């Protein structure tokens, strides 16, 4: 069954701790994306990667880091430098082509206490 | 600057038709997407427009006017399960897949 998985669905961390969110896809998509969603706001792009071993900052990259060592995986680390990390984090992937539609994983809700 | 506007909330009656508008001002344009998102879940793809006109897909249709920077999503024969947020997103550059999202429109369908 092809799709995008994110784990865990809910994550709790203490302030000052780094935390890594997992995103895996078996759709053979080249591009992957990380978004953050806060109540009453649209999705905001954190980082994106169009190909293995390459990634670019999105609009709100400060306090986050990523890696893209494998095509299937695009983990996001929320560092202690992120001032307001509590949010719903969504990972997406796309195959390129004419429409280049992004498909989303189920999301991880991170709460920093 | 980049700006996408949608109404925050809408209410409609089961069986009726509802139109959700989206206006955009972006530095470039290479396609507009509509997604549906139920509370606490992932957005799911509904439609894509890159040329002017209407795209129909079952009960859902999407319209685009590039000259006016305007799109709408039309939902017919509303069902209770259509209660969700509807996200409008614009791709502003053809060389990246980056999307700019509006804040979303929360639609409540009442019996």
Image (cartoon, grey):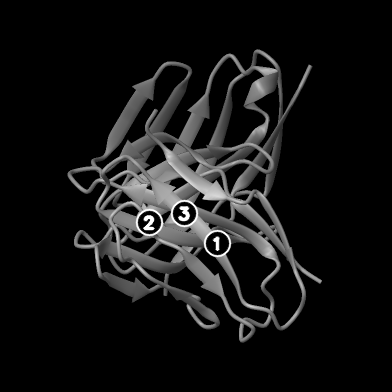
Q: Is residue A88 above or below residue A53?
A: above
Considering only vertical position in the picture, is B21 above or below A79? Answer: above
Tag 2 or tag 1, which sits nearer the N-term?
1
Q: Which residue is mark 3?
A: A23
Q: Name the disc covering residue B42, or none.
A: none
Report which residue position mark 2 lands on.
A73
Confirm or deny contact between disc 3 and disc 2 (CB under 8 A).
Answer: yes
Percent x, y of residue A47: 41, 69
Circles 3, 1 touching at the beta carbon (< 8 Å) = yes
Q: Is residue A104 left or right of residue A42?
A: left
Q: What chain does mark 1 sit on?
A: A
Q: What is the C-alpha distance between the residues marked 3 and 2?
A: 6 Å
Q: Which residue is mark 1?
A: A21
Query: Which numbered disc, 3 or 2, marks the residue that appears first in the sequence?
Result: 3
Q: Residue furthest front?
A: A69
Instruction: Say which element carries label 3.
Output: strand
From where the camera sits, is residue B103 visible? yes
Q: Is residue B41 left or right of residue B36?
A: right
Residue B89: x %, y % from top left: 43, 51
């Amino acid at each position: 069954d092809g799709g995008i998985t994110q784990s865990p669905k809910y994550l709790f961390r203490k302030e000052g701790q780094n935390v890594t969110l997992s995103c895996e896809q078996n759709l053979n998509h080249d591009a992957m994306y990380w978004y953050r969603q806060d109540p009453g706001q649209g999705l905001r792009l954190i980082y994106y990667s169009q190909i293995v071993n390459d990634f670019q900052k999105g609009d709100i990259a400060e306090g986050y880091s990523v890696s893209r060592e494998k095509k299937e995986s695009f983990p996001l680390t929320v560092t202690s430098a992120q001032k307001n990390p509590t949010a719903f984090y969504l990972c997406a992937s796309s195959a390129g082509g004419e429409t280049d539609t992004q498909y989303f994983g189920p999301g991880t809700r991170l709460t920093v206490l | 600057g980049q700006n996408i506007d949608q109404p925050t909330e809408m209410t409609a009656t089961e069986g009726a038709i509802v139109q959700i508008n989206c206006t955009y001002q972006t530095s470039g344009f290479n396609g507009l997407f509509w997604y549906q998102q139920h509370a606490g879940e992932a957005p799911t793809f509904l439609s894509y427009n890159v040329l002017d006109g209407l795209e129909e897909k079952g009960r859902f249709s999407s319209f685009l006017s590039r000259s006016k920077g305007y799109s709408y999503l039309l939902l017919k024969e509303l069902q209770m399960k259509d209660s969700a947020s509807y996200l409008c997103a614009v791709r502003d550059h053809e060389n990246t897949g980056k999307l700019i999202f509006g804040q979303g429109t929360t639609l409540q369908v009442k019996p």
